[in-house]
Amino acid sequence: MRVYLVRHGEATPETIDPEQPLGERGRDGVVRLARHAAALHLGVTEIWHSPKLRARQTAEVLAEHLVPPRGRREMDWLTPMADPSIAAEALALADEPVMLVGHLPHLGRLASLLLVGDSAKGLLCFPNAALACLDRSEDGWLLAGMLTPALLVPPA
């Protein structure tokens, strides 16, 4: 089973808008990521996202490009300070590729928990609009690849 962990795009500062929607630059970064992910034919069945606006907007853009058959779903356990073991339990029950759209520190803690069994290790760096691909095998989870904004070609 494959899971994609995605950090939301760059948000408007809280001092400007307390809801912190995606800013123009953030939306552009997510669109670049979504186009690249669609070109790779990721085969995502469903997108799970945090209830926070910036994550929901990121998930909406990704869903437009990836067209997951089951759409997208809001999950309370994808907030920044949520316990990563809850997400790990949900992924243990999943049998089709899913994408999780969330925040730091949660995504980093979740990746560390899945990869080495310790959420405090801090193995992966998640800039805004970054995607990590993890594969579950009989031996556990493996990092299959990662896309960061620095690797994606900016729009012409």
Image (tube, rainbow, N blue to C red):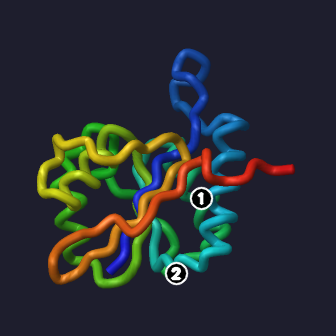
Please give the name of the residue rendered at 66% of the width and 47% of the height, measured from the top-left corner. 29
Residue 141: x and y, percent? 24, 69
User: Which circle marks residue 111 in the picture?
Assistant: none
Q: Is residue 83 left or right of residue 155?
A: left
How many numbered marks, from 0 up? 2
Please give the name of the residue rendered at 17% of the width and 47% of the height, measured from the top-left corner. 119
- Of tags 1 and 2, which is closer to the observer? 2
**2 or 66: nearer the eye?**
2
Please tell me which of labels 1 and 2 falls first in the chain.
2
Identify the element where label 1 is drawn. Answer: helix
Q: Quadrant of residue 27?
A: top right
User: For the N terminus, which image quadrant?
Assistant: bottom left
Look at label 1 and name its amino acid.
Glu
Q: In this view, which residue lies farthest toward the left?
A: 117
User: Which circle marks residue 43 in the picture?
Assistant: 2
Q: Is residue 94 left or right of residue 73?
A: left
Residue 56: x and y, percent? 52, 51
Q: Quadrant of residue 82?
A: top left
Compared to residue 36, the image places residue 25 above or below, namely above
Query: For the residues marked 1 and 2, what is the alpha-carbon distance in whole angstroms?
Result: 16 Å
Residue holding disc 1: 60
Look at label 2 and name its amino acid.
Gly
Identify the element where label 2 is drawn. Answer: loop
Residue 148: x and y, percent? 54, 50
| Callout 2 crowding tier (Cα within 10 Å): few <14, some 14–19, many ≥20 | some
